[in-house]
Structure formats: C-alpha cells, structure tokens
Image (cartoon, rainbow, N blue to C red):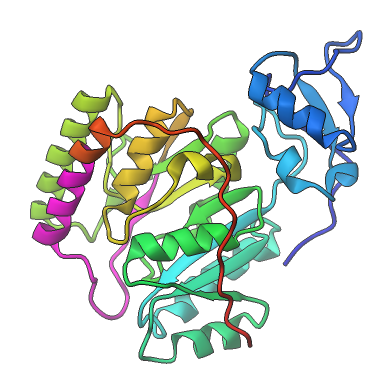
Amino acid sequence: MATDRPEETFSLRKEVLLSPSTDGTTSHSTNDVEQLRLAAESGNGDNVVIDLNAAEADREAVSLRPHLKVLAQPKVSVIIPTLNEAKNLPHVFGELEKQIAKNNVHEIVLVDGFSTDDTIAVARRLRPDIRVVTQTRRGKGNALRHGFDAATGDIIVMLDADGSADPAEIPAYVEALTSGADFAKGSRFLKDEASGSSDITQLRRAGNWCLNTLTNVLYRTKFTDLCYGYNAFWKHCLPHMDVDCDGFEVETLINVRVAKAGLSIAEVPSFEADRIHGESNLNTFRDGWRVLKTIFKERVRRQGKVEASSPSVEEVAA
C-alpha cells in the first residue's frame, strides 16, 4: 500500500532549532538527527523544512511535530480493533479500498481480540498485505494500544470494524491534522450536516451529554462528543496518550490526556451509521461508569515525563 514519496518537503513546527536562511526557513536533511531531537525538546527556534526523501531513513525525526503546512502527503495507518467481525469486514475493507486507491491510506493494522469466527481469515483474503496483531488482554483499550505500537505511519486513524464509521471521512481528518491540529476528534454533534448518528439511543445520547459536559467543566475543554471512537492524530501524540486501560473508556482517556498535554485538538464532523451485522459489545451502564471513573481519575493524575515507549507487538504470521 505504500507509495513513492514525492519530491517535496515536509515542514516542522518551531520546536526545531536551526539557524534560518534569508527566506526564514532552513533546508536540512535528517543526517543530524540528534540536533533535531534536542531542538524539538527546547521549544525554541524557527521552522525547518526537511527533505522527505533524505529523511526516509528516520521517520521519527520527521514526525516530531508537523507545521501548519505539510507539502508532502503523510503516511496514514488505519487501526481496526476486531472481535468476531468477519461479516462486517467485506463492507469496511471495500470502503477502505477506495481510500487506498487514492493514496489516502498507507497501511491497515487489524488487532484481533480472540475472535471465534474467521475474522482474521476474511481480513487476509480481502487484503493479503494486511498486518494482523493479537492483543494480550480483552477490551478495546488493549487492542488500540497494540495497534498504536504496530503502526508505521505519520498519522494514525482509529476505525471501528462494525461498519458504523465511514472511511470516506479519512481525508477530512487528515486535512485537519495537516492544517495544524495535533489531534483530530470526530464528532456526531457538531452543527454541521455531515455530523449525526443513526445508531445512538436516547439513553446513550443523554449519558454522553452528561459525561461530555462534566469533562468540559473539569478540564476547561470544548468537546462536543466525548465518547466517540473515530479519531486521528499525528504519531508524536502517542507518548502523551500512554494508553493503559483496557475497556471502552479508552476514548475518554485519550481525549483527556491529549487536552491535559496542551496539544491542539480539532473536531471533525462525522456520521455514525448502524452496525451492519452482530451486536455491540458496549454496555451502557457498565461502560458509562468506567468512563465516569476515568474522568475523575485523570483529573488528579499528574502528567509524568513524556518518553516514547518501545513497541511490544505480537504480529500474527500469515
């Protein structure tokens, strides 16, 4: 799914410290990776333009923090947690195929949570080049953690396997990120015709509103849809998220930690369709309680020093 990198440049934010040229920017390759790292941590300096072709050997240095303009197309990894979704995958992968054909998606990482149907076999039949990872414990949070560790793209997209999220929206998320946001959060409740849901019940809608309002008050945020799992972000956000929960509270944990870290968040209008086959593993009261506990727990949690963790990925051989 990877494509040749264009003969263009990639711009980083002011975290990179190098002497600017007369036109206000500095052309530079990633040969001096250590200088880039130290400069990025210093928070000073001027914008740096990095040659993507020269930087291909060190993707981490390039993706320290994208600037308002990304001149070359970033690589996009789509993470799909699954649990007995064999019947839904043909639809989801069919829509993803359209994005792959447009070079909007670099790779698909499927994280399986001990499916008892032929989810993995169907996925491999549909996409022979798919990467399949197994999670170590049950739950969506654990699945996403392993998917994040396995991703190789500049941008990571979280996509459900039940057919409720539309892959055609991926370009809108990527646009929000390449326009300056660190984290692009999907919302079903923006005042936009592209926002909405045919799946959410009145009870879940009310619960989401209460939890969303509480979060906005406690964290001084402006979320419109706290408990929605269709999100995308630059890979440099991962250490700030440090996902360490197992259940459906993971979206809340990610949203809150991203906000506490002071990262730039942009909401993207999204429409949630009905699940195509099967029933959701979400339990309104049990998972709502877990979300509530997470909101209060994170309120008193101190932000530790951010360090990139070493990936621990168990990939399933074909």
Q: Measuring 59% from the left and 55% from the top, which residue is drawn there? A: 310
Would residue 125 be found to the left or right of residue 106 on screen? left
Position of residue 78 relative to residue 30, above or below, is below
Q: Nearer the viewer, residue 15 or 197?
A: 15
From the top left corner, tell me how far across and down residue 231 is, in percent.
44, 48
Q: Quadrant of residue 144?
A: bottom left
Residue 159 in sight in this render: no
Q: Is residue 105 magenta?
A: no
From the top left corner, tell me how far across and down residue 118 is, in percent.
44, 91
The magenta region covers: 269-295
From the top left corner, tell me how far across and down residue 81 is, in percent.
42, 68
From the top left corner, tell me how far across and down residue 131 is, in percent.
61, 74
Q: Nearer the viewer, residue 72 or 183?
A: 183
Would residue 173 be found to the left or right of residue 217 on screen? right
Would residue 214 be found to the left or right of residue 76 on screen? left
Q: Is residue 279 magenta?
A: yes
Would residue 62 be found to the left or right of residue 163 on screen? right
In the rendered view of the protein, which quadrant contains the C terminus?
A: bottom right
Q: Nearer the viewer, residue 284 or 88?
A: 284
Q: Measuring 62% from the left and 85% from the top, which residue is drawn there? A: 317
